[in-house]
Amino acid sequence: MDITILVNLSYIAASILFIAGLKMLGSPDTARRGNAFSSSGMLLAVLITLLDQNIVDYRYIAGALIAGSIVGYFAATKVKMTSMPEMVAIFNGFGGIASLLVGSAEYVSGTFDNPAFLGAIFVTVLIGGITFTGSIVAYGKLSEIISGRPFLYKGQQFVNGLLVLSILLVGANMLYIQGFISAEQTLMLLLALAFLLGILFVIPIGGADMPVVIALLNSFSGLAACAAGFVILNNVLIVAGALVGASGLILTNIMCKAMNRSLANVLFSGFGAVADASSESSQEQGEVKPITAQDAYLILEAASSVLIVPGYGMAVAQAQHAVRELGELLEANGAEVKYAIHPVAGRMPGHMNVLLAEANVSYDVLVEPDDVNPIMETVDVCMVIGANDVVNPDAKDNESSPIYGMPIIEVDNSKTVFVLKRSMASGFAGIQNPLFFKPNTRMLFGDAKETVSTLVSEFKA
C-alpha cells in the first residue's frame, strides 16, 4: 500500500477516535473509556506521522517521548486533586507554546512566501503566545502565588488597544510588507507582543472567573494547534485542534451562562475589584451561630432529606471520601441524600464532579441548581462544604453586589444550613457571604475532613 494512503487512512482513524473519545468524556460513566480512546488516537497520529515525515534524528524524538511520558506519569499519579486546576492551566500553556514553536520554526526557515501560509504562521504564533503567558498567569492566580484579585489600572483599555494595533502592524509586515524589518526581528517583536497581551489578558480577571478563563485558554490552545496544522499541512492536527478549540468555546459559553454573564463581562469587568464586603464588621450583618459536630449530628440524625453542596474547601481538605461515607450513613439512616453541583464550583470546570467521582459517589445522586432550587424549602439540612460564592444570597438579593444575577444554589431557603469552613474568610472572589449570618445557618468551624469524620464517628457510635 502507498505510504500516503496509509497515512491518510490512519489520520482518519485517529480523528474518529478523537471524536468518539470527546463524546464519551461528556458522561462520568464513559469518561475513562473516552480518555483511552482519545489517547489511542493521539498515539496513532504520532506514530504514523513519524513514518510520513523526514525525521532529522529519531534519537531526539525518542528522548522527547521518554521525557514527556515521565512528566505525564508523575502529573497523573502525584499531583493532588487540589492542584488539578493549576495543572490544567499549565497544560494549556504547554499546548500554546508547542504550537508557537512550530510556527516560529517554519517562519524562520523561510520556505513560505504565500500570504495564506504566513497568515497561518501569524495566527499560530499569536494565539500560542497569548495562551502560554495567559496560562502562566492563570496558574499563578489559581495557586495563589499571585493575588486572585483583578489587576486594573488607568488607561487599561487604551494600552490594550495600542497593543492590538501594534500586533496588527507586525502582522501586516509579516504578510505583505516583508522587508521593513528582518524576519527574525518581526518574529521577536510578534513574540514579545503576544506574550505581553497574554499577561494583560488574564491579569484583570478575578479569581471567581477562573473556571471560564481555563475553558477559554483551553480553546485557545486548540485553535493554536489547528493553525499549526495548516502551517505544516497536517490533517490530523487540524482536526484535533479544531475539536479542542470548538469544545473549549462551548464550555466557555456554558460557564458564562452558569454565571448569567457574557464573555465580554467576564473578560473586561474586573470582577472582584470592588470594596471587599468582608471589611464591614460582622455586627452590621448579625452574629454567626457556631455549632459543634455533636450537635450537628443530632440534627442530621433526625433529617429525612440532606443536600450536600461541595466547594473548593472540600478539595483543600481532601474530604471527599469522608463526605461519601457520611452520605452513605445518612442514607442507611433513612435520609434522602443528594449532592448539588454548581457549574462553576471549584477552580476549573467539573472540579467537584471529578472529586466526587474519585470518591465513588454515584452520578445518580448529583443534581444541578435548577433541579433543587424549586424544592429547597422542603430540604431539612443543607451541608455547604467549603463553598462560598455559589451559595451567596447576594447574587439574588443585593443589586450592588458584583455577583448579582448569577444563578446560585439557594441553600438559604432550606430549613437548616450547616456551613463547614475553617474561618470567616471570604471566598476566592473576595466577597463576604451574608449566608453565614442567616437565622437558619449554623457554622461548623474547622478542617472539613476532620469535621465530617467526627460526624461519621457519631453515626457509627
Image: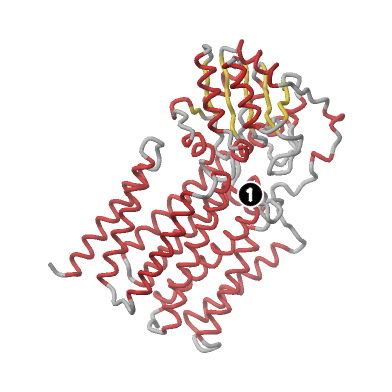
Toward which corner of the image does residue 401 lie, by quadrant?
A: top right
The C terminus: image quadrant = top right
**Mark 1: which secondary structure?**
helix
Give residue 251's position: percent from left, percent from top: 49, 46
State the residue position of label 1.
Answer: 265
Which residue, as the protein is rendered here, is positioned at the far front?
A: 461
- Dot 1 crowding, Cα within 10 Å, few <14, some 14–19, many 20+: few
Q: Nearer the viewer, residue 68 or 219?
A: 68
Residue sitting at 15 percent across and 69 percent down?
A: 2
Q: Residue at x 80, y 39 (%)?
A: 278
Residue 147 relative to residue 242: left or right: right
Residue drawn 64% across and 28% down?
384
Could you tell me which quadrant the N terminus lies in? bottom left
Tally the numbered discs.
1
Residue 78: % across, % down: 51, 50
Between residues 99 and 396, which one lies in front from this camera angle? 99
- The colour scheme used to paint the residues is secondary structure
Q: Is residue 291 above or below residue 35?
A: above
Which amino acid is tagged 1? Asn
Q: Residue furthest left?
A: 1
Residue 430 vs 3, above or below: the answer is above
In this rendering, the answer to whether 254 lies above or below 329 is: below
x 60%, y 43%: residue: 261
Nearest the viewer among 332 and 188 is 332
Where is residue 343, by image quadrant? top right
Could you tell me residue 135's position as x and y percent?
A: 57, 59
Percent position of residue 379, x then y: 59, 17
